[in-house]
């Protein structure tokens, strides 16, 4: 078994209004890459937000009293704190240099997943308005252009409870189920799996993150080729919701 990671070269610094599907298509053609059925294109959320004009201008924000109170605890710029609050439905916890919130999309993560890297000074990118819809549009465009069955996953970099360091995480998908339910399958000893569910989209996002990097690598889009479970997980109506744990089953939030 072999899985390949291919960083797409020549992706420019995108601006509002750019067609990300077209940008990726041009990169694939320029690289002379032979796109295959079952290939999965993973795209950094910053690329999507910038192209969709989803940019926060921090200098235009007037912090609320609550933002100033939280900023005093976490030692962040009150304007950034206000942006975090504006993009959240719940503040879960505040600590040194972090604010754990639930975003409007249902993601529980640090700082509402607002990113100040890879944008100009004074700007920040929030999570795209609808990552699933963005993934769907890009997938349908690329499938039409290349006549291949594909999947698209929008990725972000997030931390994890009880672990140090950030990893690639899926925040939107189209063309593939993000969760692989393996309950009922047998292990090597013939025992039936009773609870096994694999966050496949997150695993693919983490793999792609090795190529994307977090600094100036310049590979915001990566193709994963050779994923053997693609056909099994193929779903043109998929979204990211199966990966979101319902609050009633979250034993760490009261």
Image: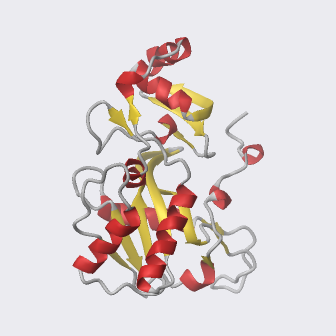
Q: Quadrant of residue 43?
A: bottom left
Q: Residue at x 68, y 69 (%)?
A: 196
Residue shown at 56%/59% (left/top)?
133
16 relative position to 93: left or right: left
Place of residue 69 in the rendered image (x, y in percent of width and height, measured from the top left): 51, 13
Quarter of the image where the N terminus is located: bottom left
Identify the residue shown where x is 40% and y is 41%.
Answer: 125
- Picture quarter containing residue 76? top left
Colouring chosen for the image of the structure? secondary structure
Quarter occupied by the C terminus = top right
**Residue 28 picture location, percent across and down:** 30, 77
Q: Do we see residue 59 in this rendering?
A: yes
Tell me what residue is drawn at x 24 percent, y 69 percent: 9
220 lies above or below 228: above
Q: Hey, which quadrant is residue 7 in on the image? A: bottom left
Image location of residue 207, percent across then percent down: 40, 66
Name the residue nearer the viewer: 165 or 168.
168
Q: Is residue 76 visible?
A: no
Name the residue at the front extreme: 17
Q: Position of residue 134 (x, y in %)?
A: 51, 59
Taking the image as shown, residue 64 lies to the left or right of residue 192, namely: left
Classify 156 as above or below 126.
Answer: below
Tag count:
0
- Nearest the camera: 109 or 136? 136
Q: Is residue 10 above or below residue 236?
A: above
């Amino acid at each position: 078994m072999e899985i390949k990671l291919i960083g797409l070269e020549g992706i420019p610094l995108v601006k509002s209004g750019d067609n990300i599907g077209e940008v990726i298509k041009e990169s694939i053609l320029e690289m002379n890459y032979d796109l295959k059925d079952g290939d999965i294109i993973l795209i950094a959320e910053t690329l999507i937000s910038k192209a969709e004009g989803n940019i926060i201008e921090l200098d235009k924000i007037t912090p609320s009293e609550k933002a100033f109170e939280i900023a005093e605890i976490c030692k962040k710029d009150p304007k950034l704190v206000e942006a975090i609050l504006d993009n959240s439905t719940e503040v879960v916890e505040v600590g040194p240099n972090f604010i754990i919130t639930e975003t409007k999309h249902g993601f529980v993560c640090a700082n509402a997943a607002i990113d100040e890297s890879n944008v100009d000074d004074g700007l920040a990118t929030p999570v795209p308005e609808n990552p699933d819809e963005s993934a769907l549009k890009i997938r349908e465009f690329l499938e039409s252009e290349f006549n291949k069955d594909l999947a698209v996953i929008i990725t972000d970099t997030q931390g994890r409870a009880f672990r140090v360091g950030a990893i690639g995480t899926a925040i939107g998908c189209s063309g593939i189920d993000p969760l692989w339910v393996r309950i009922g399958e047998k292990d090597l000893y013939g025992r039936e799996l009773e609870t096994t569910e694999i966050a496949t989209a997150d695993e693919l996002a983490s793999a792609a993150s090795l190529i994307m990097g977090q600094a100036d690598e310049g590979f915001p889009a990566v193709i994963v080729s050779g994923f053997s479970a693609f056909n099994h997980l193929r779903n043109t109506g998929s979204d990211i919701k199966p990966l979101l744990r319902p609050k009633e089953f979250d034993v760490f939030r009261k």
